[in-house]
Image (cartoon, grey):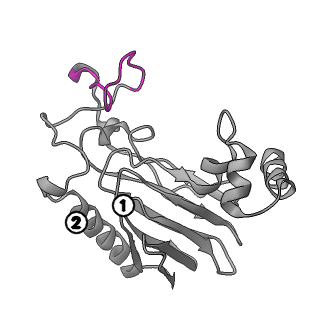
């Protein structure tokens, strides 16, 4: 039997998905689909601004479903685990202008400051206590601690983060108005590029010495 609290969370999640995929052509993140179904062929040799469709004869019922019910058993260095629901993890969203993920944060875990250049993010916390913060282009910081059933919105391309501030694991489901929102991690963008951004650029930008930049690079490399 499904509890009333679970039913409420499922209903709220459905509403969020509906709001993000309503047909607002002038504000759409992805182009409108030209067919009912276009299950992404991730193995296709050619991909032009998306993925080609799997042949209709190869489409099955399983293509339209994915599973977010399993708790993670491993976490990355940030005590974070990500279950993919974008086009790479859930090919059914190809051409549909929507994607979603499951993000789990262990105790003290963080989804570090990052941006999504191609999509607006709406999310619902389903477990634990999560501090959600975002920074606007005029350098104003907004934040709030959310508990299960509470919802957040991150405008497209703004820097934001999620931090587990509870005493147990935390989970939230972010939903996007694009099949592939992309992610630009602030630290990775600056310190993990190939080839590296010159130290002179970083030392002058942050107004610190080479030793500080080198220490950051070394710490990130060790992880």
Judging depth in this view, the residue of 158 and 223 nearest the camera is: 158
Residue that carries the numbered disc 2 in the rendered image: 19
Task: Pick whichever of labels 1 and 2 is earlier in the sequence.
Answer: 2
The answer to if 3 sits in the magenta stretch is no
| Residue 38 coordinates in the image, percent (x, y) | 24, 32
Tag nearer the camera, 1 or 2: 1
In the visual, does 17 lie left or right of 32? right
Q: Quadrant of residue 53 in the image?
A: top left
Tell me, for residue 217, which label it has, or none.
Answer: none
> Residue 26's image quarter?
bottom left
Q: Residues within 10 Å of mark 1 (few under 14, many from 20)?
A: some
Q: Are marks 1 and 2 in contact (CB under 8 Å)?
A: no
What is the count of numbered marks? Answer: 2
Q: Which residues are magenta?
A: 42-56
Q: Residues within 10 Å of mark 2 (few under 14, many from 20)?
A: few
Q: Is residue 48 left or right of residue 172?
A: left
Using residue 205 as the reference point, say whether residue 61 is left or right of it.
left
Q: Secondary structure at mark 1?
A: loop
Residue at the location (61% across, 62% down)? 112
Spot occupied by residue 159 in the image (x, y as percentages of width and height): 49, 64
Residue shown at 24%/39% (left/top)?
95
Q: Looking at the image, which is closer to me, 98 or 212? A: 212
Q: Which residue is at a point 79% across and 49% down the rendered structure image? A: 217
């Amino acid at each position: 039997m499904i509890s009333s609290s679970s039913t409420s969370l499922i209903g709220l999640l459905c509403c969020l998905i509906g709001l993000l995929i309503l047909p607002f052509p002038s504000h759409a993140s992805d182009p409108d689909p030209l067919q009912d179904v276009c299950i992404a062929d991730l193995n296709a040799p050619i991909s032009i601004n998306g993925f080609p469709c799997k042949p209709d004869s190869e489409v099955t019922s399983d293509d339209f479903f994915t599973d977010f019910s399993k708790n993670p058993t491993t976490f990355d260095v940030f005590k974070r685990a990500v279950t993919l629901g974008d086009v790479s993890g859930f090919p059914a969203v190809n051409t549909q202008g929507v994607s979603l993920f499951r993000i789990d944060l262990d105790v003290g875990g963080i989804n570090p400051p990052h941006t999504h250049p191609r999509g607006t993010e709406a999310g619902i916390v389903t477990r634990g206590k999560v501090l959600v913060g975002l920074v606007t282009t005029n350098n104003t910081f907004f934040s709030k601690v959310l508990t299960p059933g509470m919802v957040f919105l991150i405008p497209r391309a703004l820097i934001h983060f999620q931090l587990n501030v509870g005493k147990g694991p935390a989970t939230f489901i972010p939903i996007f108005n694009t099949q592939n929102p992309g992610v630009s991690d602030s630290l990775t963008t600056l310190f993990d590029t190939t080839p590296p951004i010159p130290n002179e650029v970083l030392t002058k930008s942050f107004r610190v010495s080479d030793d500080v930049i080198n220490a950051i690079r070394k710490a990130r490399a060790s992880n």
